[in-house]
Every structure is written in C-alpha cells, then in structure tokens.
Amino acid sequence: MGLLNFHILTLFPEMINDTLSHSITGRAIKEEIIGINAVNIRDFTKNKHRHVDDYPYGGGAGMVMQPQPVYDAYKSIVDKEGDMRVVFMTPQGRRFDQSIAEELSEEKNIMLLCGHYEGIDERVVEEIVTDEISIGDFILTGGELAAITIIDAVSRLIPGVLGKEESFEDESFSDGLLEYPQYTRPVEFMGRTVPDVLMSGHHANIDKWRHEKALERTLLKRPDLLETAALTDKDKKYLAEFSKRLSDKEQR
C-alpha cells in the first residue's frame, strides 16, 4: 500500500477504480504512493438476493441502506489495518475545503463511506463515523463522486504524487488566495498577448506580478477568501490601492 491509503465503502467499486485509474492519481497508484481499496458493501450482506437496503421505519419514499452490511465491511478493514478516521459523504457535513484536504493528507489510512438511496441507517453512522463531510449544498445520487473528489484533492498533497514538489504550492487556495493567471505559447492569440513580465526572465518581478494578480483575482472573484487569508501589511495596502483604482475607473 502507499504513503496514504484510501479505503472506500461503496456499492460501486468499479466507479471508484475506473475513475481514479487515470492521470495523476492513476500514476500515483501504479507507483504505490497512494493506495486505493474499494470495498463492495454488497459483498457483506447476508441477504440471499444480495440486497443491502430496506424500507424506512416510519414510512416515506425510497430505501435506506441497512446497518449490518456497512458495519461488516467496515470491520473487514479495521480488523486488518487498525482504527482510522471514517469519513461519511453527506450534505450535512463540514464543507470540504483545502484546509480539510491538508488535514486528511496527514493520515496513513482513511475510510470513506459512500451512501446511496435515501441514506444509511443512523445507528451504523453513529457507531463508526468520525467525520461528516460535504462537497457542497446539492444532492448527488450517491457518495462516490464526493469521495473521488476528496481523494483527488488529498492525493495531490502527498509527496511524489505531482512529481514536482512546488506544483501544488502556487495553486488556488494553497495560500488562501486564488491562483494567478497562466499563459503558454503562442505569445499572441486573437490579439491578446502574454504579459511582458512573464517573458522577462526576471524571477523576482515575475513572483511579484503573480502574487499581485492572485490578490486581484481573489478580490474580484472570491473576496470571502480574503477574510481568512494570511495577508501581510503590504498585501493589504496593495488591495486598498487596487480597490481605489477600480472605484475611480467605474466613476469615469
């Protein structure tokens, strides 16, 4: 297994395995930097028809996943690997962000529980779950896409996954700001040219330009992030000056 191992309890292990077998995560799996263990909850049912759900007590639409198959699938992992954080994908959980991704990247083993139908029997959730996480205020058919999203975000933080250690350091949210604009060849495209500073070879000026553009972009697109970003006095002064320039431009 890898530096960080993800154990996913799911009704659709092929969905997990197929999606993560490509690109950066696929390479990290092959190189055993991360480990993916997709466990089919259905394999642990005692129902002869392999059913894992039943009607909800109290009535209502839909079906609810039964506790026994979920718990037995969970036990099959912790009996081998020991206790670990168990993350339940649910709209009721903490909103997933980069700080949670960084927090989870410090673990050796993480279990991700994917619900389906109308949810999972509350008793097994209370028994095994340590964290409830949401990727947004919307409803998905199951927890698999949310789990894949979390695996991708967390995996990028594991040394060796991106191949180049600084690859993730300048990305959006890594320092609380959105990422600066990126450019590649050609120099001119549809009348728009690459900023001169990026072709100057002057690394200090390039770093300064990129940081200022990250500040500007964050102010314009996600000003809420500035409330928690680690801004220096120089950053705050630059943002104040940039805001004034915007205001003056609008008044013309």
Image (tube, rainbow, N blue to C red):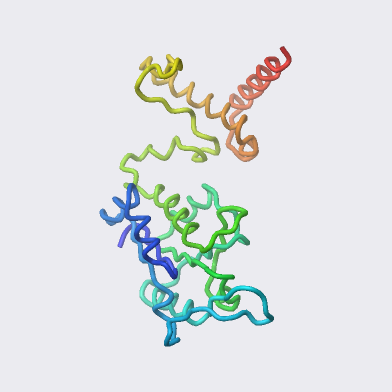
Given the current orientation, which residue lies at the most extreme top position?
A: 252
Residue at image position (42%, 67%) is 12
Tell me the quarter of the picture where residue 220 sits.
top right
**Which is more toward the observer, 62 or 199?**
62
**Which is more toward the observer, 149 or 243?**
149
Residue at image position (26%, 55%) is 30
The answer to whether residue 172 is above or below residue 31 is above
Q: Is residue 236 left or right of residue 185?
A: right
The answer to whether residue 61 is above or below residue 205 is below
Q: Is residue 7 left or right of residue 132?
A: left
The answer to whether residue 93 is above or below residue 119 is above
Q: Position of residue 71 (x, y in %)?
A: 48, 78
- Tell me the quadrant of the picture where the N terminus can be found: bottom left
**Which is more toward the observer, 226 or 13?**
13
Q: Position of residue 250 (x, y in %)?
A: 70, 17
Q: Position of residue 176 (x, y in %)?
A: 55, 39
Residue at image position (67%, 15%) is 249
- Looking at the rendered structure, the number of numbered marks drawn on it comes to 0
Given the current orientation, which residue lies at the most extreme right position?
A: 251
Tell me the quarter of the picture where residue 107 sits.
bottom left
Q: Position of residue 32 (x, y in %)?
A: 28, 57
Q: Is residue 215 left or right of residue 34?
A: right
- Tell me the quadrant of the picture where the C terminus can be found: top right
Tell me the quarter of the picture where residue 202 sits.
top left
